[in-house]
Image: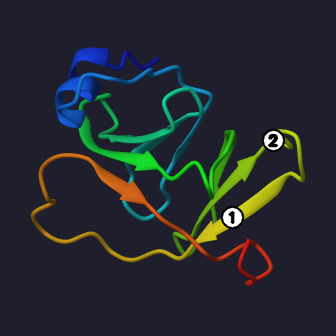
Amino acid sequence: FYTISFKEVNDRLKDGRTEFKPSAAAIHPLERRLYILSSAGHLLVVTDLRGKVQETYRLNPSFYPQAEGIAFATNGDMYISNEAKLGKATLLRIPYQPRPKAPAAGPRTLKSKTAANGAAP
């Protein structure tokens, strides 16, 4: 059972203009952290296993128009699925890159051009 503080999420975004309504979550197999996807607000929030917010990412709506699912491969690669919002459903693969020792403060934008089949979406 996790309780995620909207205030913590909003404070990290610094612009105060977001929605956070989790639609999917998964635990990273190597990092042992919880990744939470919010289609509303186009967010990916990373917490420790107690629910303490550690990182926030804005999802680029061009790649993630309606992100509704998240999963990880055993090697750490992340997969995000998008519902078919007036088009085709997509499954994007984000190759795992170990995080730096000291994560940067503030929000970042998650970008990906790699689809599940290796082609650009």
Front-most of residues 70 and 83: 83
Indicate which disc, 1 or 2, sits on the residue closer to the N terminus.
2
Report which residue position mark 1 lands on. 92
Q: Position of residue 34 (x, y in %)?
A: 43, 42
Q: Residues within 10 Å of mark 2 (few under 14, many from 20)?
A: some
Q: Amino acid at mark 1?
A: Leu
Based on the displayed image, in which of its 4 quarters is residue 85 positioned? top right
Q: Position of residue 38 (x, y in %)?
A: 53, 32
Q: Is residue 37 above or below residue 73?
A: above
Let me know if residue 72 appears in the view.
yes
Q: Residues within 10 Å of mark 1 (few under 14, many from 20)?
A: many
Front-most of residues 84 and 28: 84
Horizontal relation, residue 49 to residue 30: left or right: left
Q: Is residue 112 above or below residue 47?
A: below
CA distance for labels 1 and 2: 12 Å
Q: Position of residue 76 (x, y in %)?
A: 51, 69
Report which residue position mark 2 lands on. 83
